[in-house]
Image: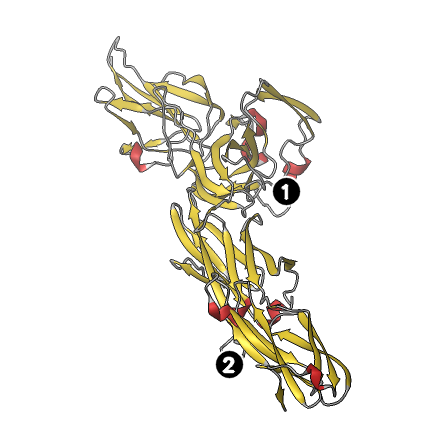
Amino acid sequence: MVATFSVSVERLAVRKSAPAPLTQQPKSASCSSLLQRKGGGASLQLPAAVVPSVGCGFLVQPSRGELQAFEKIPVAVTMHATMWGLYTDVLIVQIGDLEPMRIPITARVTGNPLFFQMMGPTFNKNLTFNRTPTLHFGSHCCGRPAVHRSVRVTNPSPVDIRLDWQTFKVIKDDPQLIDLIVVVGEAFPLLDGSSVVSQEAQDARADLIQVHMRQHEGFASGSLFSVGSQQTMVPALSKANVTFQFVPPLTCDTDGDTFNGYALGYMSLAPQVKNVVGVVTRDDGYQVSALRMDLSAAVKPALLQLETADEEGMLYQLTAGSLLQHDGTILNSVEATSSFLLKNNGQMSLKFGMLIDGPFVLSNVLPSVGCREEGTYCLKPHCAAQVKIGFSLTAETLKGNTGDLQVTLFENQLHYHGQVKIKHDNETQQVLPLQAIVSLPTLRVSHEVLDFGTVVVGHTRELQVNVSTQGVSAVYWSVTHSDDVFEVTPCKGRLEPYTCHSCKNSRSALVVSFTAKKEGSFESSFSFHVLLGEEVIMLKVTGQGSLDQAFEAISDYKS
């Protein structure tokens, strides 16, 4: 006797379609409980199927046919799922005119349907997800602005899923094993500005106090790692962008620090999809596995290697006499330069600016490493730049008009102490000292007092006075006096720097004359002034006039 039969499911029936390779990332791949191996495990393929909107369905093969007398036909019931939950259905078997047989079906689907598009869904030999993606922020300088990385989350399920993010940092040699989480009220309440969960979800409180336990892997990261939006809505059969953030700490070790962490996205559902009477019940929050992203970042100090061209460092040696021309006029300025080398030995570009105390000035930077922002420079990894700093000497500088710059006088030399401040964009700075030594003009007069003795009235007597310089600066000098009895020739001149004992241009002989115009004592003084020098040297001169011819000398002459 031949009988017809039919096998069907009551509510969650699926319609089979052509198989699709897993590499195409089919929407039913995320939580599918059926991934069949073809060709002895050479490749994985997922039978594409039209799954009911609740996220699970059953495919019966064969679903109808004929039974011969005493014949047995195996019927395969295959489940396809794109969403977790505890599903229930009824398998209805109809043979001929007999009463239909109702066989209850129960299936529990676990796992996470979401995946990051940067890696896609991957499975281990048990056909479950086994790889956690790692987001690398790279190496950055401490104190720099926050670093953002955006990734895309794909939701192949037919249900809107809200992600509540928590970020953690991993501490080496952490002895803690578990985390005990006590929740009062709703574990992940809806935040303002989100429409993922309806208001009914806010009012539904299953338990006032809940206690959850999870494996301890890290501590709350604070501001080190974070997510741009604490709650992310991933629509059904769609995608959403998630922005992760890393904030480099203000300080770090000289060798740098490495930070590891992870982010967990706990999944929450709307009440109408958590419980569908007679079809599915679902947990969410801490009761289901979270979406995980491992995080990694490195921080290094913003330091440039500074190398000066001279062993003495940035030292400038000038003379005030370099401002003098031979005719005694003063130049506007004279500049001396020195350079140092900036090296970036790190793995990241460094942006910085340079602040220089006046009268030190920035002359040049080679090669050009300037940025679009004026006064900002950027040095790429393993690159170097030569920075040339000048010292501008002017007459005002010699007077000490240098602002806050420290100036000291020592052994007739002016010492200027300044700094180059290299200010990085993370508010840290490096300092390179600058020092300029300016030698002032030094004049020496061979006599302090010059006595002409007694001279016959109407006669003139001449004596010699030597002026010289023993410094490294040229000297332009002049003599002033207010008496016509005593005279000096020449009354001004220029002396070259003293370089050796045989240098004749560093000294000069002056002739000082005394003319006795009447009988009596005479006394006066000469003031020797040095251009660009503050010192005034006084030469006191005395003489006596007499009518007695006995005081007449051979070198005297009548005026």
**x then y, percent, for residue 551:** 69, 82
Residue at mark 2: 327
Taking the spot 41% from the left edge, 42% from the top edge, the residue there is: 347
**x then y, percent, for residue 406:** 64, 58
Looking at the image, can residue 157 be seen? no
Would residue 448 be found to the left or right of residue 43 on screen? right
Would residue 559 be found to the left or right of residue 292 on screen? right
Q: For the residue marked with disc 1, what is the amino acid?
A: Leu
Taking the spot 63% from the left edge, 60% from the top edge, the residue there is: 405
**Is residue 3 placed above or below 193 in the rendered structure?**
above
Q: For the residue marked with disc 2, what is the amino acid?
A: Asp
Tell me where residue 328 sits by quadrant. bottom right
* Location of the N terminus (image quadrant): top left
Q: Nearer the viewer, residue 3 or 482?
A: 482
**Is residue 517 placed above or below 160 in the rendered structure?**
below
- The residue lying furthest to the front in this view is 550
Would residue 414 be found to the left or right of residue 386 on screen? right
Q: Nearer the viewer, residue 552 or 178?
A: 552
Q: Nearer the viewer, residue 289 or 551?
A: 551
Q: How many labels sit on residues?
A: 2
**x then y, percent, for residue 323:** 52, 72
Secondary structure category for the residue under label 1: loop
Tell me where residue 525 sits by quadrant. bottom right
For label 2, count other residues whose C-alpha is less than 10 Å away and answer few (under 14), some (14-19) or many (20+). few
Secondary structure category for the residue under label 2: loop
Taking the spot 41% from the left edge, 17% from the top edge, the residue there is: 99
Question: Which mark sits nearer the N-terminus, 1 or 2?
Answer: 1
Question: Which dot marks residue 279?
Answer: none
Residue at mark 1: 191
